[in-house]
């Protein structure tokens, strides 16, 4: 098996080189599809029958995905194939590249009380019927299953998680699961302030509040709703209540809010918050363009022109942000460089969307329904094997920014950031 697989991978690598040289798009797709079928067959012989069935829909979506073959390291690919047999809890969330996933992001809803242009397509999105969304009980069960395999951090996101009336209950249930040491929420903060005390009492440890402008009128333009002052009030209240961390997410877009970068940094002078500048990412319907995206390098230069050299903080291996302190400031500044400097090699994240689909990569279009698995009566072991099979197929890295811009993915509002 080992020799056969190695030989097969060599064939795959040389076929890719040959197909690239041909530069005939349709021919390439057919060749790649054939190669993927061979590779898939090799992989599927190592997984159990039911797990195989659950993989099929998402594998189809990948059949013509040439990126699947970007891996130039045969040995690692073989390891991935062999690893696909393992569903022991200890290894269930380790992928073929040795990445251990301990961080689960759960989208609670596809709905939102704002309409940010970079997230929500102008024409809106088709909403999953309420009955097809995960319930608080199902979320707790999933957190238990993931925690049994090493997940210790949970982030609740959306859509806008505060749109769900049972957010407090979901927090409480997640925080009560043995092994979970950190439950956080990413929110636009518009209706958060009054709920913060209860959320904290129920076990919420950290908060990310998104705010792209300090100018109320611009907020209305960017989000197509009012509410900037209420978001600021939520940030201040969160600081006052002493959460473990309060982060402010700022998606920077040229011509919209890039003139406010230094104003946001100014906020960190007195407030112990972490302002995180995020590179604008492409998703379905968000009209992303290279011109509108401001790179980490450019943002950092602009901050340093005003505040002097930033001091890099020691980041943990799986940290997605590049974190900096500024002498004399109570807070810190970070950059999320998904577009210009991806952080795939240390990725420890898995995502469950509001409809219960598991996505192993934010930019991957392969998904598997955990809701259907649960609702069809699967027990926890079976559920974990479905999850594990998806994790084992996680790719080494996502595509570059131009390929991402051209590829299909859900709208951000339906993924959960
Ligand atoms: N509604 C909540 C909020 O806005 O914080 C949670 C969901 S939102 C999808 C999560 C995060 O993704 C937010 O910080 C948002 O700014 C960010 N985001 C959405 N679309 C983005 C894009 N195209 N590029 C970069 N970040 C994006
Ligand atoms: Fe809503 Fe958050 Fe998306 Fe804005 S970024 S539309 S607040 S889900």
Image (tube, grey):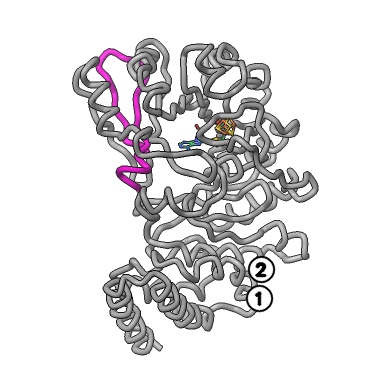
- The residue positioned 67% from the left and 52% from the top of the image is 356
Magenta residues, start to end: 321-343
Which is more foreground, mark 2 or mark 1?
A: 1
Q: Is residue 266 magenta?
A: no
Q: Is residue 331 magenta?
A: yes
Q: Quadrant of residue 199?
A: top right
**Of residues 250 and 79, which is closer to you in this image?**
250
Q: Is residue 45 above or below residue 86?
A: below
* SS at circle 2: helix
Residue 39 percent location from the top left of the image: 44, 79
User: Does residue 388 appear left or right of residue 10 in this picture?
Assistant: right
Q: Is residue 180 visible?
A: no
- Give the residue at the far right of this rendering: 131
- The residue positioned 53% from the left and 31% from the top of the image is 117
* SS at circle 1: helix
Residue 82 percent location from the top left of the image: 44, 77
According to the image, label 1 marks what residue?
Answer: 50
**Of residues 55 and 61, which is closer to you in this image?**
61
Q: CA distance from mark 2 to mark 1?
A: 8 Å
Tag shown at residue 87: none
Q: How many tags in the picture?
A: 2
- The residue positioned 26% from the left and 22% from the top of the image is 302
Ligand 2 quadrant in view: top right
Q: Is residue 94 above or below residue 194?
A: below
- The residue positioned 40% from the left and 28% from the top of the image is 252
Residue 109 percent location from the top left of the image: 67, 40
According to the image, label 2 marks what residue?
Answer: 382
Q: Is residue 84 above or below residue 314?
A: below
Q: Is residue 39 visible?
A: yes
The quadrant of the picture occupied by the N terminus is bottom left
Q: Look at the numbered discs 2 and 1 and tell me whether their residues touch, using CB distance below 8 Å.
A: yes
């Amino acid at each position: 098996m080992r020799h056969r697989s190695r030989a097969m991978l060599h064939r795959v690598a040389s076929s890719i080189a040959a197909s690239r040289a041909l530069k005939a798009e349709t021919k390439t797709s057919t060749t790649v599809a054939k190669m993927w079928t061979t590779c898939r067959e090799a992989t599927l012989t190592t997984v159990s029958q039911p797990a195989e069935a659950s993989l099929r829909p998402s594998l189809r979506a990948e059949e013509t995905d040439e990126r699947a073959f970007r891996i130039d390291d045969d040995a690692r690919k073989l390891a991935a194939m062999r690893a696909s047999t393992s569903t022991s809890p200890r290894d269930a969330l380790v992928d073929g590249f040795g990445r251990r996933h301990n961080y689960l992001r759960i989208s609670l809803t596809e709905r939102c009380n704002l309409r940010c242009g970079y997230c929500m397509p102008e024409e809106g999105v088709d909403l999953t019927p309420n009955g097809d969304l995960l319930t608080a009980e199902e979320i707790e069960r999933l957190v238990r299953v993931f925690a049994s395999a090493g997940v210790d951090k949970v982030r609740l996101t959306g859509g806008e998680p505060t749109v769900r009336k049972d957010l407090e209950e979901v927090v409480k249930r997640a925080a009560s699961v043995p092994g979970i040491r950190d439950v956080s929420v990413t929110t636009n903060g518009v209706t958060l302030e009054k709920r913060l005390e209860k959320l904290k009492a129920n076990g919420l440890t950290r908060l990310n509040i998104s705010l792209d402008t300090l100018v109320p009128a611009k907020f209305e333009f960017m989000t197509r709703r009012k509410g900037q002052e209420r978001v600021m009030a939520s940030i201040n209240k969160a600081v006052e209540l002493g959460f473990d961390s309060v982060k402010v997410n700022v998606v920077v877009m040229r011509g919209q809010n890039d003139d406010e970068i230094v104003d946001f940094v100014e906020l960190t002078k007195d407030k112990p918050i972490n302002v995180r500048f995020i590179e604008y990412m492409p998703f379905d319907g968000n009209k992303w363009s290279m011109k509108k995206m401001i790179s980490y390098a450019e943002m950092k230069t602009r901050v340093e022109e005003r505040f002097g050299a930033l001091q890099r903080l020691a980041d943990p291996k799986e940290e997605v942000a590049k974190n900096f302190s500024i002498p004399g400031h109570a807070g810190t500044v970070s950059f999320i460089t998904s577009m210009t400097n991806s952080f795939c090699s240390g990725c420890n994240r898995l995502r469950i969307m509001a409809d219960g689909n598991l996505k192993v990569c934010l930019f991957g279009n392969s998904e598997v329904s955990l809701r259907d698995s649960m609702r069809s009566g699967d027990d926890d072991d079976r559920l974990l094997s479905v999850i594990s099979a998806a994790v084992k197929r996680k790719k080494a890295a996502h595509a570059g920014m131009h390929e991402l811009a051209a590829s299909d993915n859900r709208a951000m509002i339906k993924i959960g950031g």
